[in-house]
Image (spheres, grey):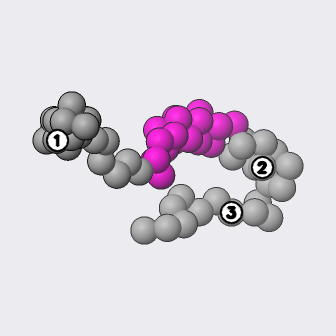
Amino acid sequence: MLADSTAQRVFNRHSGAFRIGHRSYIQQFAKFYSVRLDALKPLVLASAQKKWSSRASCTAKVLN
């Protein structure tokens, strides 16, 4: 019984050092999506211009 309480006390004393705090994965792939968008944007704009000519316009930035 004494060994169990000592082990518990030691674990509790040092367990905070090994805890992983709250992690957020919201922007985990944001860089990949940004690079993909930058690569595809000229191709999509050229294709849209070819298909719809002047009937469609491009908005540079939708969100501020």
| Residue 55 vertical placement versus 11 (above, below) | below
Q: Which residue is mark 1?
A: 9
The amino acid on which the numbered mark 1 sits, given as a three-letter code, is Arg
Disc 2 is placed on an element classified as helix
Is 30 included in the stretch rendered in magenta?
yes
Tell me the CA gap for discs 3 and 2. Answer: 9 Å
Give the quadrant of residue 19.
top left
What residue is shown with label 3?
57
Residue 14 left/right relative to 19: left
Q: Residue at x 59, y 36 (%)?
A: 36
Residue pointed to by mark 2: 48
Q: Is residue 44 magenta?
A: no
Q: First in sequence, mark 1 or 2: give its number.
A: 1
Residue 46: x and y in percent read 72, 41
Do the CB atoms of the residues marked 3 and 2 lie less than 8 Å apart? no
| Residue range corresponding to the magenta coloring | 25-43
Percent of width and height locating residue 23: 38, 48
Viewer-closest of 18 and 2: 2
Q: Main secondary structure of the magenta part?
A: helix
Name the disc covering residue 58, or none: none
Q: Name the foreground residue: 10 vs 63.
A: 10
**Quadrant housing residue 9:** top left
